[in-house]
Amino acid sequence: MRYHVLACDFDETIAHEGRVEEETVTALERLSRSGRRLVLVTGRELDDLLRVFTHVDLFDMVVAENGGVVYDPARRDRRPLADAPPEAFVERLRAQGVRPLGVGSVIVATREPHDRAVLDAIRELGMEMQVVYNKGAVMVLPPGVNKASGLAEALRRLEMSPHSTVAVGDAENDHAMLSMCECAVAVANALDSVKEHSDLVLTEPRGRGVAALAASLLESDLAEVSTSRHDLHFGTAGERPSAIAPYGTSVVVAGPSGSGKSTAATALLERLGEAGYQYCVIDPEGDYADFGGVTVFGDPTRGPSVDEVLGALRDPGQSVAVNLLAVPLRDRPAFFADLLPRLVGLRAELGHPDWVVVDEAHHLMPVELAQLPVGVPTDVGSLMMVTVHPETLSPLALELVDTVVAVGDEPGDTLDAFASATGRTAPALGEAPGTDERQGSIVSDIAVWRVGEEKAERVLLAPGEAHRTRHRRKYATGTMSPDKSFYFTGPEGRLRLRARNLHSFLELADGVDDDTWTHHLRRHDYSRWLREAVGDAELADLVRGVEDDEDRAAADSRDEVARLVDERYTLPAEPTRHDPDHDDDARSFPGGEARS
């Protein structure tokens, strides 16, 4: 289910002249029984609404006074969301004979042509207030208070998101509410300006239109309604923007190590964050520990718990990263197998998170995987899987994919591998885009294939503004997999000392004999490991300079390499605690040779 909330205006939307037809009430009752939440959002004062509408308890939450008051019908709890209007302002309007004049907990309301008296009073009293119009009604409210702000508070209390909300209205004061929600709907009697900015215009007016809307939600979840205004634009394909739909999408980002997968994935995450979508990143190697805008659970010494992750995600405004560095390699698939169905359950209950992102997906969803608790991408909203080789992913996961983002110098190879693994014909590859001189930041050339289309488009990706330090915490103190660890073997291969991270690398380097240290130094094993496994080309170049200095004594070269590493990676004073179970992995890099 995509839409979990219906937010309705009252006057001339579900009601006509203050009266709601039984047909409309019945349709809303049916919608409520489907598990969806109902929120009434009105410019009326709450007491006035309760007097004219006897079915208020049908709604899970009521926003009154055009966003100034929130009311919980089940608890009969009303809360003003801003300060009361200044008494001097109210008395001035009364003294000037402004009629009608309604004074609520937050709002002051009258009708045209008294807006002139209202504006004069605001100016002469030096007040900071806003005037909102609604088909002849004039509402005075504190700055920032509108139907959108009130609905946001109601949704927060319900633990629901605007991105799983449909809003329906008819007039000027509904614009803000309609704009904030994923699907904006106008009744047939709405103002033209409201219709022009809505995703759906109903063919029936007022309550009959809302009843039809409720029926469509039950029947199709509004699958036929386009909400492309929310598409995530992450680059350009020639002169056209390239975009990905934020709902029901399953993306695999694939390419060789160091090819730019992280750049592409984080660019998409930043677009999601900017648009207010909630995401959950499953982070096996600590790559997102410093990513802005997320709460991180787990660190190199403490594994996350599923309960704490699910608890944080109940707040739709909070995205999370689940750091698995402290979870032994052999236990990570089990942790993921426990977490994923509970994410599916949370999405079914609350309509979020909007995206689940699985980094190093080939480790958590390997080709041998026999069961996946996701039948369609919409079970988790949308899904992104980041991997080196798409053919190493579970066929069950590959079946979900509708978009492939291939990065690296040979994106065609990645697309061919995906096509072969899924039994499809590989797409033709468009021409690579030229350099965009208008971009103020580095751009990357990627290939995007909408699976099933004959051609993949080449896209110039504009990375996001936030630049995370690539893998630094993982490589400094985390546990690198055996295939990416460094091994001191010595000139005769008698040793097998494994460095699981940069910290243990320097500890072991300080303890090995000069012959062992120099053996790897002269073979350029250190710079190769830093370049290929750690992915730090700049540090690798600096260390290569030390390796090439044949006149430098072993002790001096050791000290210089340690200094260079420590400058770029702030290492802890105490040794990192390791898990001996990791040594059981069959793959390793003897002699410091890294394989990917």
Image (cartoon, rainbow, N blue to C red):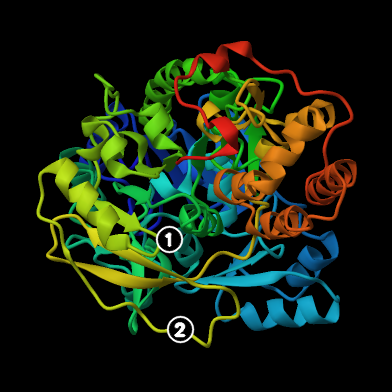
Image position of 574 (left or right of 354)? right
Q: Name the residue type under label 1.
A: Leu
State the residue position of label 1: 178
State the residue position of label 2: 435
Image position of 428 (left or right of 152)? left
Q: Is residue 574 above or below residue 164?
A: above
User: Foreground residue, 353 or 13?
Assistant: 353
Image position of 469 (left or right of 64)? right
- Tag 1's secondary structure? helix
Measure how far apart labels 2 and 1 are at the Cα level.
Answer: 39 Å
Quadrant position of residue 243: bottom left
**CB atoms of marks 2 and 1 within 8 Å:** no
Q: Position of residue 446 (x, y in %)?
A: 37, 66
The residue depicted at 23 percent of the width and 48 percent of the height is: 417
Q: Position of residue 371 (x, y in %)?
A: 26, 20
- Tag 2's secondary structure? loop
Q: Is residue 559 above or below residue 463?
A: above
Sort mark 1 into few (<14), some (14-19) or many (20+) by Cα contacts within 10 Å: many
Sort mark 2 into few (<14), some (14-19) or many (20+) by Cα contacts within 10 Å: few
Q: Position of residue 123 (x, y in %)?
A: 80, 81
Image position of 394 (left or right of 86)? left
User: Can residue 28 be seen by looking at this rendering?
Assistant: no
User: Foreground residue, 587 or 84?
Assistant: 587
